[in-house]
Image (spheres, rainbow, N blue to C red):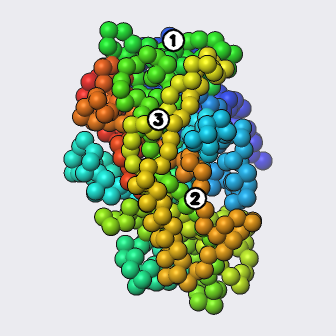
Amino acid sequence: MSRLYIPPTCPPTPPTGYLDQWIPLTPIEEMEKTDYDVLIIGTGAGGSAVLWRLCEQLVASGKRIGIIEAGDLLLPMHAQNLPTINVERYVQLFTNPKISIPIGKGIPDFPAATLLYALGGRTLFWSGVSPRMHPSVLSKWPLSLKEMNYYYNIAEEVMNVSRDYTKGSSITEVLVNRLRRGGFIEAAGFPLAVDLAQTKYGRIHSNVFFSAMDLFAYSLNRRSFDLAVNARAVKVLHENGKAVGVEVMNPDKKSFFLKSRNVVFSAGALDTPQILLHSGIQGRAIGHYLTNHSFLMAHGVLDRADFSELLGTLGILIPQTNEQPFQIQLYGPGVDFWYSYEEPPLRKELEVRFEGFGIVESRFENQVYLNPNIRDEYGVPKIQIDFSYSEKDKEIIDRVAQGIKQVSEVIKAPLITRNGQYDLCLMPAGQDNHVSGTCRMSLDSYDGATNPYGEVFGVTGLFVADNSMLPPMGASNPTLSTIALAIRTADYIMTKL
């Protein structure tokens, strides 16, 4: 009998380190010891795009990049990607006042305003609808259409924007045809930021709906950077017309001073001007030209017999045109625009949700400003908002309402009342979550807070890369444009490093 061979016992290979969370974090105490080349404030659409572009282009440069988030870790991906989330739970999570802080309760002119502090910001919950701004809007921006299209292409590629999500869905195809025959010739399936690639060869594609977490993932796998959460920026530090860093506070209200010769604010169109104003940054336009969309909503019902057995999903965009100063989005059927493990029931009637977004004029008197008499827990003056619709805005609201009614007739979906509400409603100001313009870019400091690259007038090395940078934005969802401009700002910053 041959002698048995028993191999020697080998201990498991020890890990190189340990993670306490699903993303590497750096203590704010450690970040205080580093002199950064670029420090980003905010982790939503703009901040994550700046981070991704820097990490992509500066792989082996040795440049030091930091990014901080006022909130905590919340979700590792877009909420709609979570297998435990359905539409009802999604709404319950997003509207939880612990997550979407209802600051509008204290702002009469902007009653639906909310703030969301979490890694990834609002991209954890956004619709994903990603149209480009209409050329008539872009013609008013301080950069060429050719250059903007270049950055749109980059943004659409990294966000996986396409119209494939609704492709082949009979309900979308039938209604698009009805709309085009009825005069809405631009109607088409949604341009959505969704990854529809098949999982194969070991590469996972389960993260369908895009969020800032996708950009963090790309960045992590390109090069190192420091990320701190629960780090509230309270003041920009600047000396002799140059940015030198940021004062940050942790939940215990202890102050830290992070040093950087380039600071990028991506804290959102309400928080970014708040911090700049609190820091004594001088600029006539900072906080002014606050813009949003007038937002109208309605519901209608389609006859189930008009459609084939396999419905698919309904997502149609009727975009802004030269003649139409608004866009209309159609969702359905019912709450089944997306679902994971639920089986949609067989319905006799198919509900359609209409969302209309009207252009709002960019006016100096619409503004966010500091209330010196009320401070938050970090000692920063709270914001107040002056906002009203102009007569032209009201005319457009009327046109949006008429447009929704016309679309309802064309697609044969009569409007209905739901939950005791009117069949067509103007939503409270701020409900659109498209606030922008409060640090808008311009060629002139008289009517803009930043130059065309997002650098704040009068403070070298201080940048803005979020919705607040947008000049007039037309009727489109701003996220794609914000990401495109943030990538452009990152490219400009790299020329200065």
Cα–Cα span, label 3 and label 2: 21 Å
- Residue found 62% across the figure and 25% down from its top: 230
Q: Which mark is residue 367?
A: 3
Q: Residue furthest front?
A: 391
* Circle 2: residue type: Leu
Disc on the earlier residue, 2 or 1: 1
Circle 2 SS class: strand
Number of the label disc, if any, that sits on residue 257: 1
In the rendered image, the quadrant that contains the C terminus is: top left
Q: Is residue 201 visible?
A: no
* Residue type indicated by callout 3: Gln
Distance between mark 2 and mark 1 Cα atoms: 44 Å
Residue 30: percent from left, percent from top = 55, 14
Which dot, 1 or 3, sits closer to the camera? 3
| Closest to the observer, 463 or 167 | 463
Separation (CA) of disc 1 from disc 3: 29 Å
Q: Mark 1 belongs to which amino acid?
A: Phe
Residue that lies at the very extreme toward the bottom in this rendered image: 305
Whole-percent x, y for residue 391 in the image? 43, 53
| Disc 1 and disc 3 in contact, CB within 8 angstroms | no
**Crowding near the residue tagged with mark 2, few <14, some 14–19, many ≥20 C-alpha atoms within 10 Å:** some
Mark 1 packing: few (<14 Cα in 10 Å), some, or many (20+)? many
Give the residue at x 28% y 57%.
135
State the image quarter where residue 377 is shown.
top right
Q: Which label's residue is closer to the chain start, 3 or 2?
A: 3
What residue is drawn where x is 43% and y is 60%? 396
